[in-house]
Image (cartoon, rainbow, N blue to C red):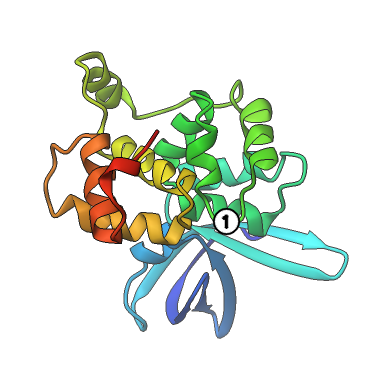
Amino acid sequence: MIASLRGTLALRETGACVVETGGVGYRVHVSSHTAESLPGVGETVFLHTRQIVREDSLSLFGFSDPSEMHLFDLLIGVSGVGPRLAVAVLSGLKPIPLQRAIKEENVGALVAISGVGRKTAERLVVELRDKLDVVGVGAAVATRAKGVLPRSERFEDAVAALVRLGYTATQAREAVQRATGGEEGLSTEELVLRSLAWLGRPAATSAR
């Protein structure tokens, strides 16, 4: 079992990278969030890994964050969720927002993830909500108690609202990203309205 890899990043590609160590190149599947944290080609990289063995394949999945790897382990234990879909889920939401969405039964945020339908989202909630110990959300809880949602949660809620209006998750994420404009204090409603304006849709049809 390959538990981790440390070596030289030989190649970066969509959804995967190649880490060369000891004269051997290992192709490792990664989420978009881990991909963003990778160094430049030719530099040293370290990844926590999970080796998945199937009858017709042997695949390696890598994680820059141990919490992401823990969530991967939980996700692949859900009925109907394989390793590739688990990586797609982790690409759609970072660990803390994903745990929060599941714990709070926010199916809308989950179906906003590419490849996740409503039935799968509901299974994630039912099978994982009692298994998750959301770590590192003390600040988020404090801000919510003051009536202010954390920035990451506002972002994900805005994305989910746009998906419910018929936009793809990719379109929604790009629109909300552009809507933030570097401002930190925008509410979910403001993000949705600005996103709709950027997408060219009348604000009157927003997140109902």
Circle 1: element type? helix
Q: In the shown orientation, is residue 54 left or right of residue 124?
A: right
- The C terminus appears in which quarter of the rendering? top left
Image x and y of residue 17, in percent: 50, 75
Q: Residue, x 37% and y 37% (percent of image)?
A: 207
* Residue 155 shows in the view: no
Q: In the shown orientation, is residue 121 left or right of residue 203?
A: right
Looking at the image, the residue that sits furthest to the right is 55
In the image, 78 versus 57, the foreground residue is 78
In the image, 19 versus 122, the foreground residue is 122
- The N terminus appears in which quarter of the rendering? bottom right
Image x and y of residue 86, in percent: 61, 51
Q: Residue, x 68% and y 59% (percent of image)?
A: 51
Q: In this view, does 30 lie above or below 139?
A: below
Q: In the shown orientation, is residue 120 left or right of residue 110?
A: right
Q: Residue, x 48% and y 55% (percent of image)?
A: 91
Q: Disc 1 marks which amino acid?
A: Val
Circle 1 residue: 87
In the image, 185 versus 138, the foreground residue is 185
Image x and y of residue 133, in percent: 50, 24
Q: How crowded is mark 1: few (under 14 residues within 10 Å), some or many (20 or more)?
A: many
Q: Is residue 40 above or below residue 156?
A: below
User: Which quarter of the picture shows residue 130?
Assistant: top right
In the image, 59 versus 93, the foreground residue is 93
User: Which quarter of the picture shows residue 201?
Assistant: bottom left
Q: Residue, x 54% and y 80% (percent of image)?
A: 22
* Residue 142 shows in the view: yes
Q: In this view, does 84 lie above or below 39?
A: above
